[in-house]
Image (cartoon, helix red, strand yellow):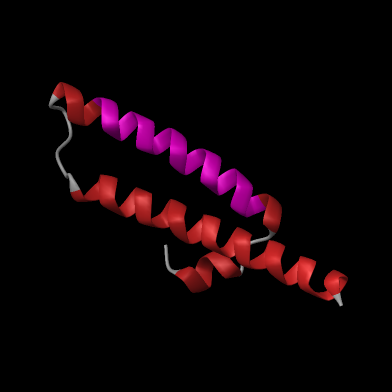
Amino acid sequence: MEIDEVRKLSDKEISEKVLELKSDLMTLRFQQRTGNLDNGKKLHDVRKTIAKCLTVQKERQLAAAKPAAK
């Protein structure tokens, strides 16, 4: 998922996406530990997507707080 795609999502959708991705990450980690994971890059991609979602959330929080501070 690209950062532009994440920015098009609403705040609620981003929160839901983060929860879904964290669940996927946990599943992938279990698969890795048991030796069932075929593609290790998938772990990397899921972590990066979580980071993108959390970054956009933080940007929006800071943008909302900035006008209130003025």
Residue at image position (45%, 38%) is: 22
Which of 60/32 is in front?
60
**Horizontal relation, residue 20 to residue 70: left or right:** left
Residue at image position (26%, 48%) is: 42
Q: Quadrant of the N terminus?
A: bottom left
User: Residue 18: where, in percent of width, then height?
Assistant: 53, 46
Magenta-drawn stretch, dominant element (helix, strand or loop): helix
Compared with 34, 9 (above or below) is: below
The quadrant in which residue 35 appears is top left
User: Residue 36: where, in percent of width, then height?
Assistant: 16, 28
Residue at image position (29%, 34%) is: 28
Which of 59/48 is in front?
59
User: Residue 33: where, in percent of width, then height?
Assistant: 19, 25
User: Residue 5: where, in percent of width, then height?
Assistant: 52, 68
Residue at image position (69%, 67%) is: 62
**Horizontal relation, residue 69 to residue 31: left or right:** right
Indicate whether residue 6 is drawn in magenta. Answer: no
Compared with 20, 59 (above or below) is: below
Compared with 70, 2 (above or below) is: above
The quadrant in which residue 49 appears is bottom left
Q: Find the magenta span and give its range.
A: 13-30
